[in-house]
Amino acid sequence: MIKDLNFPSDIGNLRLVEKAIDELSLELDLSDEVYGNVLVATMEATNNAIIHGNRSNPEKEVKIKMKLEDKELMVHIEDQGEGFDHMNIPDPTAPENLEKINGRGIFLMERLSDEILYIEEGRIVELKFKL
């Protein structure tokens, strides 16, 4: 089972991702916990791809592939940006960052997925969830 999405970098297209995850959840009969983890982590990764990777440029696309293999859901999110150094992200739990309204996406993605891979300097993020 594979789901593919390709769409312009417009924050309004997050609804397409949410709809695809809802459909996937029904197909796979995901528990509420797994559904929530997949939804939040994927939405955060997609939001980052649109805003930070593609700089909200609607001429650039975000590509998402979701596939099930050996009781593991893999979500592949790819942008057309320059990538980033995932090892150099400020810690959102540090006292100086606690009141900032952004900067928690990667922290959430890493906590909610069972495995996360950063490929091509972070231009591609793969989230893995055990079912």
Image (spheres, rainbow, N blue to C red):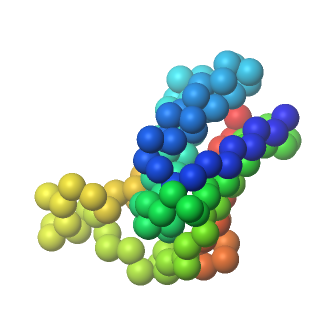
Where does the image place residue 3, in percent across and percent down from the top left? 76, 38
**Residue drawn 60% across the image and 79% down it:** 121
Q: Is residue 110 visible?
A: no
Q: Quadrant of residue 12?
A: top left
Pick the residue in front: 87 or 22.
Answer: 22
Is residue 57 toward the left or the right of residue 79 in the image?
A: left
**Residue drawn 32% across the image and 73% down it:** 90
**Residue drawn 27% across the image and 58% down it:** 102
Is residue 16 toward the left or the right of residue 90 in the image?
A: right
Is residue 82 toward the left or the right of residue 71 in the image?
A: left
**Residue drawn 50% across the image and 34% down it:** 15
Q: Residue furthest front?
A: 59
Could you tell me which quadrant the C terminus lies in? Answer: top right
Where does the image place residue 29, in percent across and percent down from the top left? 69, 19
Where does the image place residue 53, in percent across and percent down from the top left? 50, 68
Please count the marks in the image: 0
Could you tell me which quadrant the N terminus lies in? Answer: top right
Q: Can residue 61 be seen in this view?
A: yes
Where does the image place residue 100, in percent across and percent down from the top left? 18, 60
Q: Quadrant of residue 5?
A: top right
- The answer to whether 33 is drawn above or below residue 113 in the figure is above
Pick the residue in front: 87 or 81.
Answer: 81
Q: In which quarter of the image is residue 63?
A: bottom right
